[in-house]
Amino acid sequence: MPEVTPRPLSSLTTLRTGGEPARMWDAHDRDDLIAALRAVWATGEPWFVLGGGSNLLVGDEPFEGAVIRILTRGIERLPAPAPQVARLRVQAGHDWDELVAYTVAEGLSGIAAMSGIPGTVGAAPVQNIGAYGQEIVQTLVEVELIDESTGEVSTVPAADLGLGFRTSVLKHHHGSEPIRRAVILSVTLDLLEVGPAPRRLRGAQLRQALGLGDEDAVTLQWVRDHVLATRARKGMVLDDADPDTYSAGSFFQNAVVSASVARTLPPECPRWPVRPDGLDVPADPVRIIPLESFDGYIPPADTTEPDVKVSAAWLIEHSGIRKGFHLPRSRAALSSKHALALTNHAGATAAEIAELARFIQGRVQAEFGLILQPEPVLVDVDL
């Protein structure tokens, strides 16, 4: 069994907080992972799994439970489900950015815009990771997971995971339990085989972020290089030499609001309609009514407006909180490069980071009436 000597979680999380757990398991392969989870669940003790540690804020006190580190790796190419489609099965502990680099080198399109996101492949569907208009929901086929309630392993199609904006039925949201308590063992993706040639990018948000016109053609490698450079400028690529990257990435989610609420915000606040990127909704959709069922009545068109995603970074900065801000005598600060990243520059405690997060939430709510929701999973710490 892969039980190991516990290590302080501050040494295993990118926010560099967290005490030592009572027990720790290192699972290097699928069988070890299943065995460790079943053993821990049999005790009834508190537990959580740890991948790259890039989406966690862990409290300062020792964790009275077990931590299972998912260290499994491997990319397997499965039979193609359709022409020009590559199907990959990836182990949960595989580094996400290493997977993206592999797909770009192989000429496989679908996740290049998510280059540089820290963490593991198994964590990606849990909160439906995304960047610049791409989300894993667009390429995810299924996951293999193990349920805590039964200890059984099953394959679950993406449609059954409740994937939404930074959420799924597996996500441990702030203040609530996940709908389904389970751990992902592997992830299966379908990616388009496009090769190394330049091509037009789908998705207005991605083209805008990269400064491309509607008809500009670029390679997958060009997209990856420019996304990595953009993220690095914002301190969103892990770098031990840069304290601005001692963070959990974006600490707050972009707010998703109704179209009517979005209209109450200043017009210069960046916003995007919430719909799958690249699937443009036509202004005048064609409606087909079978002749045998036509009774002379044509139902009115659906005029429901899509929800709108608004920039949390813009809301923070325009509530009066600037990059680099910190509370008096606190060692936690906003990144000097990106208003969404809370950073641990000088040995900040989890309590100091939580205090800064609460202050930011209060300022944004007072100024704009919106409560920003934290993106990381909070363990033994509250906002």
Image (cartoon, helix red, strand yellow):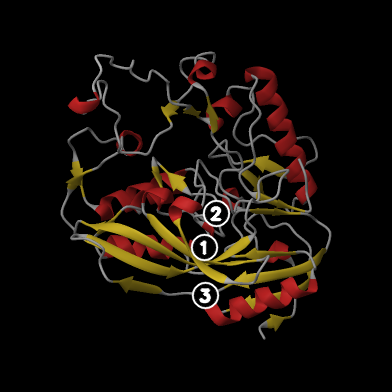
Query: In the displayed structure, would residue 42 be above or below residue 170?
Result: below
Three-letter amino acid code at the position of disc 2: Val
Quadrant including the N terminus = bottom right
Along the line of sight, the residue nearer the viewer: 142 or 1: 142
Q: Residue at x 33, y 18 (%)?
A: 301
Query: In the displayed structure, would residue 358 be above or below residue 298?
Result: below
Mark 2: secondary structure: loop
Quadrant including the C terminus = top right
Q: In the rendering, at what x and y percent does residue 107 appear? A: 24, 60
Q: CA gap, disc 1 to disc 2? A: 8 Å
Three-letter amino acid code at the position of disc 3: Thr
Q: Residue at x 37, y 39 (%)?
A: 276
Per the image, the residue denoted by label 1 is 122
Labels 3 and 2: the sequence-earlier one: 3
Q: In the rendering, at what x and y percent does residue 195 appear? A: 19, 59
Query: In the displayed structure, would residue 170 be above or below residue 41?
Result: above
Mark 3: secondary structure: loop
* Cβ atoms under marks 1 and 2 closer than 8 Å: yes
Q: Specify the label residue 247 is tagged with.
A: none
Question: In terms of image quadrants, where is residue 368?
Answer: top right
User: From where the camera sits, is residue 130 visible?
Assistant: yes
Q: CA gap, disc 3 to disc 2? A: 17 Å
Per the image, the residue denoted by label 3 is 72
Per the image, the residue denoted by label 2 is 126
Judged by depth in the image, the label closer to the viewer, 3 or 2, is 2
